[in-house]
Image: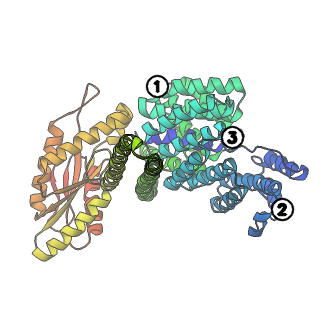
Amino acid sequence: MAVQSARSRTLGLLPALLLLAALTGAAADRGQDILERAQDLRVTDPESAIALLDQHIAETKIETPEILGDDIEHLRAGARLLELRARIRRDIGQREAAAQDAVLLERIAQALGQPIPVARAQFMHGTIQAERGDIAAALERFHDARRTLEGTNATIELARVINAIGVAHTFSHDFSRARDYYEQALSTIRRADDNALETAILGNLALAIAELEGPEAGLAAHRKALTLARERGDTDAIGNQLANICSRLVETDRLNEAATICREALDRVEELGNARLIAGTRMSLGDLKLGRGQLEEARQSYEAALALAAARVPTVEVNVLEKLAALDERLDEPQQALDRLKQLMALRAERLEGERASLIEELEVRYRVEQQEHEIEVLELDRELQGSKLRQRNLLLIGTGIALLLVTLLMLVAWRGYIVKSRLERELAKRNQELGEALATITRLAREDPLTGMLNRRAFLELAEHEIRRSRRTREPLSLVMGDIDNFKSLNDRHGHAAGDEVLRQIARRMEQSTRELDIVCRWGGEEFLFLLPGTHKEEACRIIQRVRDRIAEERVEVNSQSIFITMTFGVATVDMDIGAAIERVDQAMYRGKDGGRNQIIVEENPSAGQVET
């Protein structure tokens, strides 16, 4: 499940997003010539393209803040050069320099005072933040661009921004929301008839469909996108969709067809020079060779993918390291497999920390977006209320001048104004209540695991510190247990992403039903869970966890009319002063259980500890 979704995101999303910032408009003759020459060099020799742009940008003095007072045409010409340099720097990994260009581009766009240049600058800045892995900040930029474009006739620009919002949600694993945005973007672009952008959006939609409905449905959607790209002669889109189809064919074990498609895909993406697509395609070729039993050839393809992805494409890097570790073990090279696993664990820990922070930031961004929308509605209601009051005053003044003949009419008007005012005040109160409920929901989501409803890592660590302090005061024992679902990756490979999610939800419910009310249980990450058992020695902790293990092993999980047998391996340790050290010990104990055959409870190593049960 995790490998498939990571591969899907790797092969299609950012390349499609990076196609969307095309340059438009005319410039001065020399500036236009520089622009065209730099465009020609962008893929084949990006460093020369940057050097060419550096020289002309310096001549225009566009990087000097005081230049913002110059004429509009000068600003527009310089902005086009600056935008192209930001794109090239972003594409070759010079993200800090690209971000500086984007900030200056936004300032120039604001000086122009026109919505489309402002939205283009916001969009460019968002794509750079997405490349840096700051998805929450990118999402906020894209929403800024969307609000800037709403109410204009810039249909193509609006479709591009809506698509980018979908890509950001895909990176956050919110595939359902991403699909909604892709469909909105597709509907918008079809009103403007932009073939290239329509093809890119259709490819992104296919990736979301593959995640939500499985590789077969995704394969059909990618084939449709490829047909459209071939009809329109879109070279970039053809390479992108061939890479995705290669991945889907390997996932569905159509190895003979995949061999032809994957080779064509590799030739195409190598011509494009996109490291992300090349690495992902080589990883798919490694999967193909592994499926055919060609172990050494598979390792060569994986190592070629790793060389491209290292420190540049983290999703591919993690997946390839996992595959190489398993392959080294099959080839009887345990030391190399161990080295790969150590590197993999370090990368996973770094990604987990980043994803958790990004999730919290994304929730905050969503709250701010919703809050701004509510504030707009409240301002509209307030404007209506003020208008109603003004109408009442005018009517009262007129009524005073006309005297008693209009008294009845004035009373009716005043009563109507009172009713309108009361209704508006009730609506204002309702909006304020909704804002409060949204804030409460965001606070809850920041402490819960969205899949299982359990405590997340952050909430668990806060409660753990509280229990450690209490244990120190009362001198009561405190035990920690880590559990990991056995063979979970194989389960995902056989039954799919959705089945894996359902297994996690059902196992989480059984854990909560099998533990005591005072016990603290959380989803630590992936298929790992942590139990904090207050007032409990290691021996009693083993008995409690034995009940949990028996409950999980005795009741099969029913998923998609299939009965799946699940076991778990547990490690047990005593918590002293440092929860971090206890987690390391319990993790080591659990992995000794994994190495010893799985489906066990292992106590941390000490003179009297050892294996409890198999």
Image position of 477 (left or right of 247): left
Residue 557 appears in the rendering: yes
- The answer to whether mark 3 and mark 2 are in CB contact below 8 A is no
From the viewer's side, name the closer residue of 74 and 559: 74
N-terminal of the pair, mark 3 or mark 2, is 2
Q: Residue at x 60, y 38 (%)?
A: 159
- Answer left or right for 481 relative to 456: left
* Residue under label 2: 60
Name which of mark 3 and mark 1 comes first in the sequence: 1
Tell me which amino acid carries mark 1.
Answer: Glu
Numbered disc 1: secondary structure = helix
From this viewpoint, is residue 255 visible?
Answer: no
Residue that label 3 marks: 270
Percent x, y for residue 15? 62, 42
- Given the image, on which type of amino acid does mark 2 rest? Thr
**Residue 582 pos. (x, y %):** 25, 66
For marks 1 and 2 on the same chain, the one whose residue lies earlier in the sequence: 2
Residue 546 location (% of width, % of height): 13, 49
Q: Which residue is mark 1?
A: 216
Residue 524: x percent and y percent? Answer: 30, 54
